[in-house]
Image (cartoon, grey):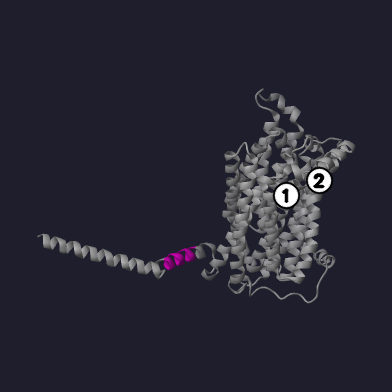
Amino acid sequence: MDFFFYQKIKKEIISLWCNINDMLFSISSSHFFYLWLEKIKNSLSRSLEVPPERIGKVVATLMLKFCFSYVFSTLQTLKEPLSVFVQSEYAQGKIAIIAILKGFGVLIFSFIFILIYNRLIQIFSAPKVFYGCIIFFLCWFLVYVFVLFPNNQRVVLSNFEKYWMARYPQNEHFILSISQWHHSLFFILAELWGQIILVGFFWQIANEVFSTNEAKKLFPLFIASGCMGGILGGCFSLYEGYQYHNNYKMVVKHTILSIVLVIFLILVIYTYFFYQYMKEREPKKLKKKSSFYQSFLEIKNDKYLVAIAITVVCCGISLGIVDLTWKGYVKLFFKHNQSSYHIFQSAVLITQLFFSILFCLRQWHISYNWLRTVTFGTYTIVISGFLFFLLSVFKLSWEKWLPNNISSILIIVVFGTLYHIAAKTSKYAFFDSGKELLFAGITDIHKKRKAKMSIDSFPSRLGKSGSSWLHSLLLKMVATSEVVKITPYLIPFLLGTGIIWQMTNKYLGKEIEKRIGKEPPKENCSKL
């Protein structure tokens, strides 16, 4: 009996060994993995209505957008606490430093970048220009986190600040932005990352490799992927803020080091993406070189591009006018608590990106036409901003009804936060995808690149700087350093900008429908 029992055990062991060998063979030959990958590819192909052979391109684009947005969101949580809560004995009106930096610093650097980009794109290929820009940002972040930020007291222009502050105290915002030059430069380059790399280069890539019909389906998905990257960046910043609540230097150091690692990942993904999907499509350099002025004239003489530029400017002004006022109240609420301000910024960023994902995944550009979608975003931004202004202007009328333990500033900050979430969600989910769809309607690659980078660099910055100029002008006229005191004068500008914005949307709605209608069928277009 023992003999038969051992024989049975022997057969079971041999059978198990054979099964293990078969499994190892299947894994080594990647057969199981290949079938699993093909199943996922076919599933994505059916849901996105994209041919299976193009799924790799879509996934690589999603990863790029994810990484770009991660860097952007982490920079968003750092730039304002570093600029607003500067280490200075002059404490009044520091929130107006943001208006100075956006109104003058970022605009000047944007203009310089357009000149440099227009020159480089004529000498080098687009991938080399991209690598150059990415490496420049990478080097700057390393210098800031290891050299400038640890030696903050040494690099600050203290004597310059005391000398000019004693003579021109009314210009304290300009003086502080210059004396704290390293924080100001960090703020400017953080803005340029979102403007040049995220908005400029990424959407330039997406517009070149995807047709207009594909863009209607995929661009909201790309924005959703970017929102997920932004949420991850916001969660990381939020965790760092809680972990090192009393040591903000560690928050800055760890956050920037995570940015550096993600930038290295961007370089790897872009290299793969270029050699797999873009190398054969890269056009030859133009023999005829055009100056910046000639490139500007090409946009000026095209009504379609001028209309796109107007919508970008109007969006920037509408958001900036209200945003600076809301941040003024936030600054009053948090006073000098830098870590709490950082945590608050991270939480708001995560919330607005979460709602952006929900709207993007609904694929609004499939359910509605272009005009209806963009109009919804325009009305949301303008009307919610108008309501926030009304709440601020009539504060004296309703604050007497509040309990003693609740301040009017807290109510305004909460309502302003709801506005900020609604406005930014509308921008990300409706305006951004709609704007990129407009560029997808341009067939000439050289014209598309110049128009895309020029509009995203200068008119985009002009809109944000325009709101900052308006704040600075009104601060001078009212003779105050508190941005919350000029709120009543901003309402007419917000409503006027909203009217011009919607009129331009109607014109572009007609044009984009014509261009989409003229495009060849999906299966015949943009073959690699």
User: Does the magenta stretch mainly form a helix, a strand or a loop?
Assistant: helix
Q: Position of residue 439 (x, y in %)?
A: 70, 63
Q: CA distance from mark 2 to mark 1?
A: 12 Å
Residue type at mark 1 is Phe
Q: Quadrant of residue 17?
A: bottom left
- Would you identify the image quadrant in which residue 371 lies? bottom right
What's the amino acid at mark 2? Answer: Ile
Q: Which residue is mark 2?
A: 178
Q: Is residue 232 left or right of residue 200?
A: left
Which of the two residues, 93 or 224, is positioned nearer the viewer here? 93
Residue 34 painted magenta:
yes
x and y, in percent, of residue 18 in the image: 28, 67
* Horizontal side of residue 55 vs 489, given as left or right: left
Name which residue lies at 20% across and 65% down: 11
Residue 486 place in picture, x, y as percent: 81, 37
User: Secondary structure beneath disc 1?
Assistant: helix
Q: Residue furthest top?
A: 404
Label 2 neighbour load within 10 Å: few <14, some 14-19, many 20+: some
Residue 12 drawn at (x, y percent): 22, 63
Element on which disc 2 rests: helix
Instruction: Write down the region rendered in magenta.
Output: 33-43
Question: Please, is residue 303 above or below residue 320 in the view?
Answer: below
Q: Is residue 366 visible?
A: no
Viewed as shown, does residue 135 lie left or right of 228?
right
Which label's residue is closer to the chain start, 2 or 1? Answer: 2
Query: Residue 428, which numbered label?
Result: none
Q: Residue at x 63, y 68 (%)?
A: 209
Res. 418 in view: yes
Q: Residue at x 68, y 34 (%)?
A: 334
Q: Which mark is residue 186?
A: 1
Q: Nearer the viewer, residue 347 or 23?
A: 23
